């Protein structure tokens, strides 16, 4: 077919441009160009890595003496889109030279020679590390092994001063350790393990147990002019609804993960700018603000307790003003029970005036029943009155829970936080 002069003028430039574009694509490569990558990336026998030399294309691997060089289970990884002959996972006879051929996608090839030998195992790492309680059972906690930093971290709950546990450590073939893999060890402080490989090479690990608890177990507040022990007794400490002393529901209903430390002071006590007399926290936990700082306990003070692992919990320290402070605001394991008229219980308290009358006030109905108070002695050297509380003849208590209502000799009345039970005798 014959083209007109006009057509030739139009088509020839188009063909020229297409030719240039094609050349540019060829020079720069294309998405469909075949890869030339052809490397053995890793060579392993079980957990032992071979050393790959890309300059000489040789692979050297040293195996413990328990391996037979005539039957070595090898696994490799190679470049993407490459193939390897005779295979990527097979059993090798390394008593003689073994050659692998890696072929790239573009058909280019390279040969690798594998050289194997047996000798003393040089591995001195800790493979696994488990801790057990002295009574046995399951491992206590998950353990983090960092073989780069040579550290082993155990995050667990620590409730005592000493942390003595049984160990179960897995080491490479022929390796030994000090302390031993099955020893009972005190981890109160960091422990240094020396692992010695079969060939004599050593590595040192530091094992550290970190306490993940962030509890405030007890707190004692000093008060100006207070004689009894020079501090206020804490009424209750709450965390996760586990209380060290009795505390009414309305005070801990919304604790969630935090807690309250409730104290009872006389209205005359000075609470401004004090330091805690004593504070007991979880082992190695820290407090913000610290307990050696002055605080104004005439209002709520919040302490943030942080565990070694970084877990945080807030405790609100609250002081409640009273006319009477019972020495024992509640009983550690249940409350006092009154079941007969001859039953008398100690009534120890601190106040600006002595108690003259007492009633049992039902915590649900608020109804009151007269009780009997038997005076013992006046204030002791600690500023505490010691009396006895019992049933008034003819006024048995119905079954239930009661708070103690008191009247002082100066005429003031108060419903205290002293809790006790009505326990009528069975017929």
Image (spheres, helix red, strand yellow):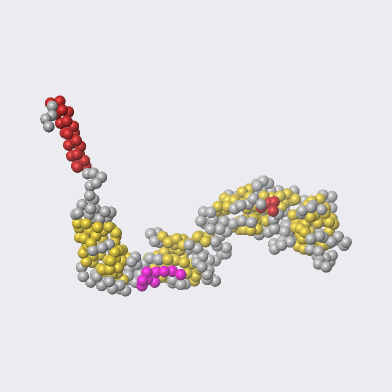
| Residue 218, image x, y percentages | 63, 57
Left or right: 74 as drawn, with respect to 9: right
Q: Is residue 28 visible?
A: yes
Q: Nearer the viewer, residue 288 or 377?
A: 288
The residue positioned 71% from the left and 50% from the top of the image is 320
Q: Is residue 172 magenta?
A: yes
Q: Nearer the viewer, residue 241 or 238?
A: 241
Q: Which residues are magenta?
A: 168-176
The residue positioned 76% from the left and 58% from the top of the image is 401
Q: Quadrant of the N terminus?
A: top left
Q: Residue furthest right?
A: 394
Q: Residue furthest left?
A: 2
Q: Is residue 224 visible?
A: no
| Residue 228, image x, y percentages | 72, 57
Q: Quadrant of residue 86?
A: bottom left
Q: Quadrant of the C terminus?
A: bottom right
Left or right: 403 as drawn, with respect to 133: right
Q: Nearer the viewer, residue 135 or 314?
A: 135
């Amino acid at each position: 077919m014959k083209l007109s002069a006009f057509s030739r003028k139009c088509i020839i430039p188009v063909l020229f441009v297409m030719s240039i574009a094609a050349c540019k694509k060829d020079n720069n490569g294309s998405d469909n160009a075949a890869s030339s990558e052809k490397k053995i990336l890793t060579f392993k026998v079980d957990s032992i890595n071979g050393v790959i030399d890309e300059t000489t294309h040789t692979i050297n691997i040293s195996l413990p003496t328990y391996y037979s060089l005539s039957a070595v289970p090898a696994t490799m990884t190679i470049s993407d889109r490459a193939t390897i002959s005779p295979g990527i996972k097979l059993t090798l006879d390394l008593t003689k030279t073994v050659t692998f051929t890696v072929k790239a996608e573009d058909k280019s090839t390279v040969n690798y020679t594998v050289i194997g030998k047996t000798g003393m195992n040089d591995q001195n790492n800790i493979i696994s590390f488990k801790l057990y309680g002295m009574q046995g059972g399951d491992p206590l906690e998950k353990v983090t092994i960092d073989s780069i930093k040579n550290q082993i971290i155990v995050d667990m709950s620590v409730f005592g001063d000493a942390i003595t546990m049984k160990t179960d450590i897995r080491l490479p073939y022929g390796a030994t350790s000090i302390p031993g893999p099955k020893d009972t060890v005190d981890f109160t402080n960091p422990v240094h393990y020396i692992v010695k490989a079969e060939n004599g090479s050593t590595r040192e690990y530091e094992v550290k147990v970190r306490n993940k608890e962030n509890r405030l177990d007890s707190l004692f507040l000093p008060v100006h002019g207070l004689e009894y022990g020079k501090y206020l007794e804490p009424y209750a400490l709450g965390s996760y609804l586990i209380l060290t002393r009795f505390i009414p529901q309305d005070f801990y209903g919304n604790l969630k993960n935090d807690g309250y430390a409730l104290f009872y002071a006389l209205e005359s006590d000075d609470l401004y700018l004090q330091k805690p007399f004593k504070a007991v926290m979880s082992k190695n936990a820290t407090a913000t603000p610290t307990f050696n700082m002055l605080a104004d306990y005439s209002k709520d003070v919040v302490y943030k307790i942080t565990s070694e692992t970084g877990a945080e919990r807030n405790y609100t320290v609250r002081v409640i003003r009273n006319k009477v402070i019972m020495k024992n605001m509640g009983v550690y394991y249940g409350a006092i029970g009154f079941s007969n008229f001859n039953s008398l219980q100690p009534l120890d308290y601190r106040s600006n005036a002595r108690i003259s009358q007492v009633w049992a006030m039902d915590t649900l109905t608020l109804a009151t029943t007269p009780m009997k108070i038997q005076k013992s002695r006046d204030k002791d050297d600690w500023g505490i009155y010691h009396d006895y509380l019992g049933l008034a003849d003819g006024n048995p208590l119905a079954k239930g829970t009661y708070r103690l209502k008191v009247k002082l000799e100066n005429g003031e009345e108060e419903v205290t936080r002293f809790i006790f039970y009505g326990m009528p005798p069975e017929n």
